[in-house]
Amino acid sequence: MTTTRVLAVANQKGGVAKTTTVASLGTALAELGQRVLLIDLDPQACLTFSLGIDPEDLDLSIHHVLTKGVPATEVMVTTEDGVDLLPATIELARAEADLLTRTGREYVIRTVVEELEDDYDWVLLDCPPSLGVLTVAALTAATGVLIPLQCETLSHRGVGQLLDTVHDVRRFTNRELEVWGVLPTLYDGRTTHARTVLETISATYDLAVIEPPIPKSIRFAEAPAAGRSILTTATGNKGAIAYREVAANLLARA
């Protein structure tokens, strides 16, 4: 039996292409014949919207699964890009408060994943841009964490805080959690600055750098408007090709 890989894509800094990474990697893994489930854990519901589902049209979402005990199978939707999705709505913002007083709150996402994992090779968790209850619960459910990182000086200041949280999660709720590495996003290899930041991160935090870096491209901004991933909307684009390579590399690693 194959082991399900549960990958949390996390960085508490916004604007680092977390959601793009989840949608693109998920689609790329599906193209490689993998069964993929994406879970949107961000109340802004950007992943849900970018895969062609309007959060305002949904009666049920991951919020109801985590706080009301609704079965995940009743909430799940199949997307046109060949991946299944547990969608989010703005109601998820309330889940943080609802879960704070609950015993075992760190394990709510793990419980959902364990019920579904026989049906999937990969579960990708799109974490909110914070280190709150939902991110800790995602890390508790995950076998690995991938950190998308914009190659700018300020964007890597939060990596240390995230790694502190990972350390605590390993100590208290999930000893098996591995940091798979940082994925450089919005990368402009022509600038010395971007290359230097990348080298600094690798040295400072002793983290693997997931190859290849994802180049900057206007096509990434256009894809969500079409409700599809860039692998569908601009299949030959450098960004799409890079995500396919990353997916193949992660699959080989797994």
Image (tube, rainbow, N blue to C red):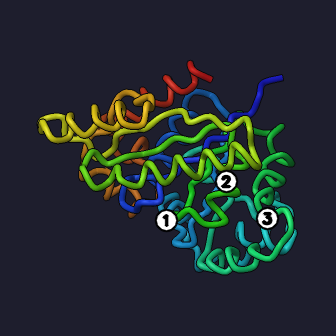
Side of 92 relative to 233 (left or right): right
Q: Amino acid at mark 1?
A: Cys
Side of 172 relative to 244 (left or right): right
Q: Residue at x 66, y 66 (%)?
A: 133
Does dot 3 land on a helix, a strand or a loop?
helix
Q: Residue furthest top?
A: 252
Does dot 2 land on a helix, a strand or a loop?
helix
Q: Residue at x 43, y 44 (%)?
A: 232
Q: Residue at x 21, y 34 (%)?
A: 195
Side of 44 relative to 71 (left or right): left
In-front residue for pair 252/144 = 144
**Residue labelled with disc 1:** 46
Question: Between disc 2 and disc 3, whose residue precedes?
Answer: 3
**Residue labelled with disc 3:** 105
In-front residue for pair 81/88 = 88
Side of 4 relative to 187 (left or right): right
**Residue labelled with disc 2:** 138
